[in-house]
Image (cartoon, helix red, strand yellow):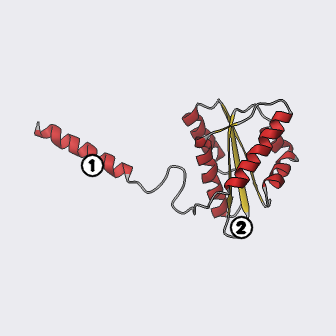
C-alpha cells in the first residue's frame, strides 16, 4: 500500500511539473507577442469570403486552432523583421493532426496599410489568389503590428 501511495505521489509531481511549463508549443520564449488588429482581421476575412462567394465558392469558416498558429507565425515574422513561410510544413502538420485537415495552405503579407491593400496584393499574385480561391473549408486571419506600426498578415486555410 505504501508503494502505491508513493507511486501516485510521484505521478502527480511529474504532472504538476509538466503543467507549469512556461513555453507554449506555439511560440518560443524569445518571440515577442504582438497585439492583434481585430478589425483588420475581420475586414480581410470578409474580403476573402466576399470574393469566394462572387466565384460561387463556399464561405470559409473561422477556426480557432488555425488562428493560434497564424498568430504565432505573425509573432515569429515580427521578431525576425521579415516576411516568411518558415516552418510551414510543421504548422500544416500540427493543424492537420489537431483538426483532421486534409490540406493546409497559407498566405502571408506585410507592408500593406490595411486589409484592402493586403487583399489586392494577394489577388494580384497568382499563387496567393489560387490559395484564396482554393477548395478549402476553414480559415483564420491574424493581423498584427510591429513596434514601428507595420502590419503583418497571416491567413491559414484548410479543408476537412
- Rendered-image quadrant of the C terminus: top right
Q: Which residue is mark 1?
A: 13
| 100 relative position to 22: left or right | right
Which residue lies at the image location 20% right of the left edge and 41% below the top edge? Answer: 7
Which residue lies at the image location 63% right of the left edge and 63% below the top edge? Answer: 79
Q: Answer yes or no: is residue 152 visible.
A: yes
Q: Vertically, is 150 above or below 90?
A: below
Which residue lies at the image location 62% right of the left edge and 52% below the top edge? Answer: 71
Front residue (pair 32, 84): 32
Q: In terms of secondary structure, where does tag 2 sit?
A: loop
Q: Which residue is mark 2?
A: 149
Which disc, if any, is residue 146? none
Provide residue 38's location: percent of width, then percent of height: 67, 54
| 88 relative position to 25: left or right | right
Front residue (pair 1, 34): 34
Q: Quadrant of residue 98?
A: top right
Q: Please tell me which of labels 2 and 1 falls first in the chain.
A: 1
Provide residue 108's location: percent of width, then percent of height: 74, 51
Q: In terms of secondary structure, where does tag 1 sit?
A: helix
> Crowdedness of circle 1 by 10 Å Cα count: few (<14), some, many (20+)?
few
Cα distance, mark 2 to mark 1? Answer: 44 Å
Q: Quadrant of residue 105?
A: top right
Asked if the residues shown at circle 2 and circle 1 are in contact, with their CB atoms under 8 angstroms apart, the answer is no
Which residue lies at the image location 84% right of the left edge and 51% below the top edge? Answer: 121
Q: Vertically, is 144 above or below 97?
A: below
Amino acid at each position: 500500500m505504501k508503494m502505491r501511495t508513493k507511486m501516485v505521489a510521484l505521478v502527480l509531481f511529474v504532472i504538476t511539473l509538466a503543467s507549469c511549463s512556461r513555453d507554449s508549443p506555439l511560440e518560443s520564449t524569445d518571440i515577442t507577442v504582438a497585439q492583434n488588429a481585430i478589425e483588420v482581421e475581420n475586414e480581410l476575412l470578409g474580403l476573402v469570403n466576399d470574393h469566394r462567394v462572387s466565384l460561387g465558392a463556399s464561405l470559409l469558416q473561422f477556426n480557432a486552432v488555425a488562428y493560434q498558429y497564424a498568430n504565432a507565425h505573425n509573432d515569429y515574422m515580427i521578431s525576425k523583421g521579415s516576411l516568411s513561410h518558415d516552418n510551414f510544413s510543421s504548422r500544416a502538420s500540427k493543424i492537420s493532426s489537431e483538426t483532421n485537415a486534409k490540406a493546409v495552405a497559407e498566405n502571408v503579407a506585410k507592408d500593406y496599410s490595411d486589409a484592402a491593400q493586403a487583399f489586392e496584393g494577394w489577388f494580384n499574385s497568382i499563387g496567393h489568389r489560387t490559395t484564396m480561391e482554393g477548395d478549402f473549408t476553414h480559415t483564420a486571419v491574424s493581423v498584427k503590428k510591429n513596434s514601428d506600426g507595420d502590419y503583418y498578415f497571416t491567413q491559414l486555410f484548410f479543408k476537412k
